[in-house]
């Protein structure tokens, strides 16, 4: 075997090894990608840049008007799913959202703040009207049939469930995540906020930065 | 001799069992103003006890039932857990606060109006009944120390 041939064999061998490494990376990468994708899909309201979350609903606002995600053209949306029988997390979160809106000043007009009930049977438009007005004049309360509300929750990948509890009013409590979604005017998911994670001032600053394209 | 007698009396005094009630102290009791009478209200407070005790029952004339709710967070979903009796360890304050453990006031008889207050009675296993006044703060209140608005 000449040294020339030997060198060629070594060259071919390194090419082959290179292909093995590349194949391993591709398969491994595909597996990891699939795994993380699966994790994202199953994690419900976890808001880490999921393309799947989008604003899509057909509901009735607290003034009795039929509205969809397209009813607020050119405006961003801050969306919170809750229910009026919720004594703790919901008022705390809505007050926080209202505080953040106030801190945005006139820029707050560029945002449609939406409160979608996950308990439409008890949260009728009349109930929603009295409720949302107490938090912020701009807050829009949305309700609908159980089917329509479920479809809206599905679009936002919001998790909710009824928990039977004999001691609770009407025998059930609702479990839910306390996220406030920021959606772009085209309905795309931007980010989530949660009361307690940052001050209302910081939330306002971040919403303004995203709306103005100054994300860090 | 006289000094010994005084010392003896002092020793006896300190050794006497203090009334159990004084061991438990309730502070920062407040409730959130409610919007609709037909919806439950919420109250928060801090319990401090010099001896281990258990909160068994809470009553108030403004609501049918007062329930202790703990918030259990699993995989980003918050569930309310009904706590039947709340353990209060010795010298370790138990704080009920927004987003965490709270008292749910079910079957309100009237709206809880900001600026008003209402009485509440807490019954402990050892300390017995303790009555307090609960201050009603605004809908956006975060606690008695400072409101978010």
Image (spheres, coloured by chain):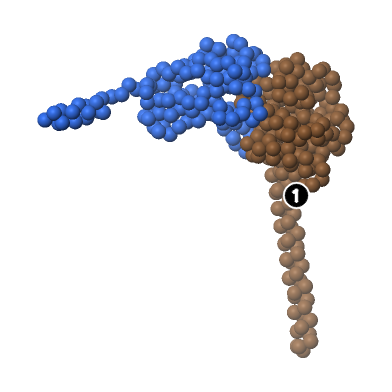
Chain colours: A brown, B blue
- Residue name at image x 50 percent, y 18 percent: B133
| Residue A92 in which image quadrant | top right
- Residue name at image x 59 percent, y 13 percent: B108
> Seen from this angle, which residue lies furthest bottom?
A2
Asked if A15 appears above or below A137 in the picture, the reply is: below
Q: Position of residue B116 (x, y in %)?
A: 58, 16
> Seen from this angle, which residue lies furthest left?
B1
Give the secondary structure at mark 1.
Answer: loop
Q: Nearer the viewer, residue B53 or A5?
A: B53
Asked if B129 appears above or below A5 in the picture, the reply is: above
Q: Is residue A103 rendered to the left or right of residue B68?
A: right
Q: Nearer the viewer, residue A104 or B76?
A: A104
Residue A179 visible in the shown view: yes
> Seen from this angle, which residue lies furthest front?
B2
| Residue B1 in which image quadrant | top left
What residue does disc 1 label?
A216
Q: Position of residue A148 (x, y in %)?
A: 79, 25
Q: Nearer the viewer, residue B106 or B30?
A: B30
Asked if A46 appears above or below A95 in the picture, the reply is: below
Q: How crowded is the residue under tag 1: few (<14 C-alpha within 10 Å), some, or many (20+)?
A: few
Q: Position of residue A121 (x, y in %)?
A: 72, 18
- Residue name at image x 26 percent, y 28 percent: B14
Q: Is residue A172 rendered to the left or right of residue A18?
A: left
- Residue name at image x 82 percent, y 45 percent: A213
């Amino acid at each position: 075997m000449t040294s020339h041939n030997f060198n060629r064999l070594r060259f071919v061998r390194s090419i082959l090894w290179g292909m093995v490494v590349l194949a391993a990376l591709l398969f491994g990468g595909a597996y990891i990608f699939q795994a993380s994708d699966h994790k994202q899909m199953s994690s419900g309201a976890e808001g880490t840049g999921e393309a799947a979350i989008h604003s899509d609903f057909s509901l009735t606002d607290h003034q009795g008007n039929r509205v969809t995600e397209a009813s607020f053209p050119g405006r961003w949306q801050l969306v919170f799913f809750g229910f009026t029988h919720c004594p703790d997390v919901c008022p705390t979160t809505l007050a926080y959202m209202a505080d953040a809106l106030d801190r945005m000043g006139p820029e707050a007009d560029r945002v449609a703040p939406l409160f979608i009930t996950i308990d439409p049977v008890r949260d009728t438009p009349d109930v929603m009207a009295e409720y949302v007005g107490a938090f912020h004049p701009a807050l829009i309360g949305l309700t609908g049939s159980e089917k329509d509300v479920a479809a809206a929750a599905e679009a936002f990948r919001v998790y909710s469930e009824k928990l039977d509890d004999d001691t609770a009013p009407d025998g059930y409590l609702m479990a839910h995540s306390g996220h406030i979604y920021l959606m772009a005017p085209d309905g795309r998911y931007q980010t989530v906020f949660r009361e307690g994670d940052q001050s209302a001032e910081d939330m306002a600053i971040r919403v303004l930065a995203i709306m103005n394209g100054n994300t860090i | 001799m006289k000094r010994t007698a005084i010392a003896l009396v002092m020793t006896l005094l300190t050794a006497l069992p203090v009334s159990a009630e004084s061991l438990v102290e309730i502070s920062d009791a407040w409730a959130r103003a409610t919007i609709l009478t037909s919806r439950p209200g919420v109250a928060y407070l801090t319990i401090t006890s010099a001896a281990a005790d258990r909160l068994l029952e809470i009553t108030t004339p403004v609501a049918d039932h007062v329930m202790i709710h703990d918030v259990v967070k699993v995989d980003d979903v918050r569930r309310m857990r009904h706590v039947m009796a709340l353990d209060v360890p010795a010298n370790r304050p138990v704080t009920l606060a927004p987003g965490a453990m709270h008292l749910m006031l079910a079957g309100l008889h009237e709206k809880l109006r900001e600026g008003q207050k209402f009485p509440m009675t807490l019954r402990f296993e050892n300390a017995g009944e303790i009555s307090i006044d609960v201050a009603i703060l605004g809908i956006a209140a975060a606690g008695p120390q400072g409101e978010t608005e």
